Image (tube, grey):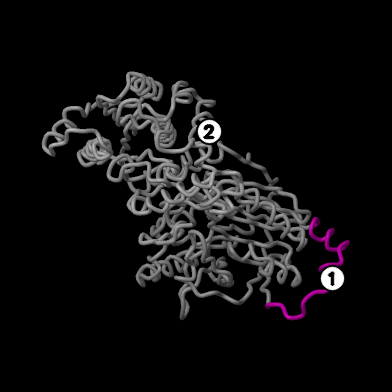
Amino acid sequence: MEFINVCIAQLNLKVGDVKGNTDKILEVWSSKDKEAHLVVFPELSISGYPPQDLLFNREFLKECQRQLERIVEFSKSLSSIAVVGMPYYEEDLFNSLVLVGRGKVFGIYHKTFLPNYSVFDEKRYFRSGNKPLMLSINGVKLGFSICEDVWHPDGWERYYALCGAEVLININASPYYANKYSFKENFLKARAQDNLAYIVYVNLVGAQDELVFDGRSLIIDPEGKVIYRAKAFEESAETVSLPLSKVRAKRLMDLRLRERLTECPSVENVLDQRKLEYFQAVLEPNPQGEEEIYKALLLGLRDYFYKNSFKKVVLGLSGGIDSALTACLAVDALGKEKVAGVFMPSQYTSEESKRYVLELSKNLGIDLLTYPIDHIFESYKDSLGSKELTVAEENLQARIRANILFYLSNKHGWLVLSTSNKSESAVGYTTIYGDMAGGFAPIKDVYKTLVYKLAKYRNSIKPDIPEGLFTRPPTAELRPNQTDQDTLPPYEVLDKILELYIEEGYTFEEIVREGFDKELVRKVLEMLRKAEYKRKQAPIGTKISKRAFGSDWRMPLINFWRE
């Protein structure tokens, strides 16, 4: 056999929609059967990923098994073989890969390395497998693994190669964060070169709650060259032909794999005598920097909106950069007809802010509702006997605005978008039940300095954000002549301190050694600690950093540790 055809089915699946996911799997498999020997689907593709505590529901597990049986029955009419991920119950529960074709199951592989860090909790649900799985198609040996298995240098890949496997298939649901892709590509190149084999890495695409899956499935040849890259943040199902001469030529001249293992698994050989067309691999563009992050935020918002069957979103427009970026994300993700902006001026709102709100909403073509809050604010103050302007009165304005947004949400069934960013929520510079309130927070994991960069990127595509927003000092406009820097250090300084502590795990002393003022660092870290109770009550938002506030960040609310 001169080549083998592998279809990479990079799909956007829904957690819990077991039948719907199976329908999609069967539709794609059927459409690709005439051109592929093997059609590969992502990790836990039948159940959706991550199913979390649905895995404790026995009826859910039974339905996954019923849908597998349906796939097996369907496969009687097809010639190719499918690689499908699912939760598989066999005396215990496993994260499994099932090889299906021609009315039978050729083999089942249980994931060996279960991640239990960051957003992963797989040891809560699954038992670890300990057996390899290989298959041969027309004499071409393939070895199979799941996600984390390939991240470990002592995983199955070397074993498979020493047992003669020329193609190594790895199915994934690997969540996105900024700059992860380049690291992932580099270590997969090393796996391919070390084992003188093709690495076929099939990743999930789509968003689930706070997680985004970027797709960008890969095929890497035995020389460590990326020969195929699927689209970023989009579904695709494409067939690629893998010429086996590349593997065989490398192995003939390289002595590392000459010493074959004597104890290898029995390998069933499947004959496929069809003469299939040769499909050239395609390298899709690889977005980076602000473009990559913006696309991730769009997908996170779009899938949360549509998978939860919302009809429209509503957000407060303040005349600031955060709400402007959030509005652009909403329009780009959902369309202008599904976005409503609300302007809620007070006596402290400047004419400048009003002008920016009107300009932004006109540029985006969205509905703009205006509800001045002065009379409501004064009514509250009269009822409470308030005669001065303290932080309590400032926060009262933010909570009045939140009440208006949630009234509109309740009245019309709209999803409220919070416009708070990561810098604000980190140090508590946000009002609980006020500006931080919402059903979803698109820029929750975006530092303020990155907000500006993303806004500039968005304006490079279409200049909808008023230019004045890039130069005016950030302000909450809850008292006269107020700016964020009355309370906070410059965002360039604040964000770097936060990033070193949160994402990079630096200690207090290590941050100080980076050149930051000792008392300033102490103040920032104390603000971070004190704001924990607010963050616990914040809406979820799309994760785009290595460590986001959410399932990544599990700090105790009662906490006496100071550094």
Q: Nearer the viewer, residue 415 or 58?
A: 415
Image spot of residue 367 (x, y percent): 31, 26
Earlier sequence position, callout 2 versus callout 1: 1
Image spot of residue 334 (x, y percent): 40, 36
Question: Is residue 288 shown above or below 126?
Answer: above
Q: Residue at x 42, y 44 (%)?
A: 444
Q: How many marks?
A: 2
Query: Mark 1 is on which residue type?
Result: Arg
Question: Is residue 433 shown above or below 482?
Answer: below
Magenta residue check for 251 = yes
Q: CA distance from mark 2 to mark 1?
A: 52 Å
Image spot of residue 13 (x, y percent): 45, 53
Magenta residue check for 223 = no
Q: In which image quadrant can residue 484 be found? A: top left
Q: In which image quadrant can residue 70 be found? A: bottom left
Q: Residues within 10 Å of mark 1 (few under 14, many from 20)?
A: few
Name the secondary structure under disc 2.
helix
Q: Residue under label 1, please give it.
A: 258
Query: Mark 2 is on which residue type?
Result: Lys
Q: Residue at x 39, y 57 (%)?
A: 17
> Given the current orientation, which residue lies at the most extreme front position?
519
Image spot of residue 178 (x, y percent): 56, 46
What residue span does the magenta drawing correspond to?
A: 245-265
Name the secondary structure under disc 1.
loop
Q: Nearer the viewer, residue 375 or 414?
A: 375
Q: Quadrant of the N terminus?
A: bottom right
Q: Nearer the viewer, residue 437 or 196?
A: 437
Q: Is residue 220 visible?
A: yes
Q: Residues within 10 Å of mark 2 (few under 14, many from 20)?
A: some
Q: Residue under label 2, please give it.
A: 453
Question: Is residue 182 shown above or below 39?
Answer: above
Q: Residue at x 40, y 62 (%)?
A: 560
